[in-house]
Amino acid sequence: MLRHFHEELEQVKEKTLRLGSLVETMVEQAVASLVDRDSRLAEEVIASDNRVDSLDLEIDEDCLRLLALQQPAAKDLRFITTAMKITTDLERMADQAVNICQRAIELNEEPQLKPYIDIPIMSQLSQKMMREALDAFVRRDADLARQVIPADNKVDALKNQVFRELLTFMMEDPRTIPRAIRLILVSRHLERIADHATNIAEMVVFLVEGKSIRHAPKEPS
Amino acid sequence: MLRHFHEELEQVKEKTLRLGSLVETMVEQAVASLVDRDSRLAEEVIASDNRVDSLDLEIDEDCLRLLALQQPAAKDLRFITTAMKITTDLERMADQAVNICQRAIELNEEPQLKPYIDIPIMSQLSQKMMREALDAFVRRDADLARQVIPADNKVDALKNQVFRELLTFMMEDPRTIPRAIRLILVSRHLERIADHATNIAEMVVFLVEGKSIRHAPKEPS
């Protein structure tokens, strides 16, 4: 019974990492579909969201079964309920990737407003945050989780930079407004992905140390 | 023991409703601070976010204790894990209310761009969605939960209307852009609040019926 429990718990970890890597690829490809002006890739990413939803449900079911059948100890209990919350965050990160794809499809139909520089950097940072937050979770590593959180400020700063730059475009030529707004939205979707990664990291610290370091809500998100 | 369990479960419901009503008031007052140009009220709402965080943690702890000590049956198990997810959504709705207050404080320092009509309607709709989703949760009422979901489209439509209207302001006079963008953000914060309410309603349907009706990700969120 005990061995069975640990095997199932390992499976929850493994599936959570698999879900994370699926979502990470979606984010990467969503931004690639914008940068490479590849709307077909964007459509593929949108279609792959189904797999995220079904894996999320599967992890949820696994966790409920573990809770029901195995009467886990306090430490494992918190781990399992945290896994259930984390998968919800991952599922919503995938939704943000889909949103980016929708903006990319619209933007790819018009001339490119400017070279995309900060947006790919935001994407890379967010992906790294997501990956490290999930590593920290499966290893129950509060230190690694804490290291994730400051990167959120970098993503925020980039988002503000994108905003300020696009504001100058809009001010100079109102015809650029619709495209500029779409790019601002893309930067906000990425910022929300980084926010979710931060949420996950904070949950991991809480899981390991039992104390909340939940961040104060910040600038426009 | 059994009676004790049901009492504790009732307490979780009661606290969840209390958290919901706290968050609802924050949303209402956040929009009031914008409409009435009352930045002091906005500051009060921001300060009240602490109470949300501590009540959220308290509910989480109550749920973990119930899971650990009481070995609940499958039905109650799912109810408790759903409560833990719902409080996370409520906490993030409160963060959105705080974001609205921050925008309100900035907007209140400048001349009002236009009368606010759609934004208060969006706020009322979102508050109603939140209230009904939580009622559906504590009563385990899937029908009521289902009724919440279509309202999300109304909120989305209003958000798009706000956007289109403000776009005309920006096109005509670029000096209005910073204020218009802030108002667009307020409408997006409200839309995210409605999104969270939709998430809660969907979780309630899943809780009661065991089937997922998770919505496809939509237009810019």
Image: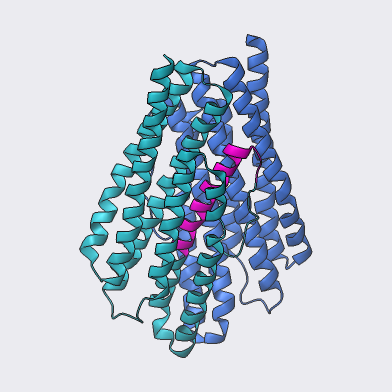
Chain colours: A blue, B cyan
The residue stretch that appears in magenta: B188-212
> Foreground: B203 or A214?
B203
- Image coords of residue A5 (percent x, y): 63, 15
> Residue B115 in magenta?
no
When asked about the image quadrant of residue B27, the answer is bottom left
Q: Is residue B202 above or below residue A163?
A: above
- Image coords of residue B123 (percent x, y): 40, 63
> Foreground: B123 or A63?
B123
Residue in view at x 62 percent, y 33 percent: A60
> Foreground: A145 or B176?
B176
Magenta stretch mostly in which secondary structure?
Answer: helix
Q: How many marks?
A: 0
| Residue located farthest toward the bottom when viewing the structure as drawn | B172
When asked about the image quadrant of residue A133, the answer is top right
- Image coords of residue B131 (percent x, y): 42, 51
Q: Quadrant of the N terminus of chain B?
A: top left
Is residue B218 rendered to the left or right of residue B129? right
Res. A8 in view: yes
Is residue B101 rendered to the left or right of residue B174? left
Res. A212 in view: no
Q: Is residue A197 above or below residue A122?
A: above
- Image coords of residue B114 (percent x, y): 36, 82
Is residue A30 rendered to the left or right of residue B186? right
Residue in view at x 75 percent, y 54 percent: A47
Residue in view at x 32 percent, y 37 percent: B54
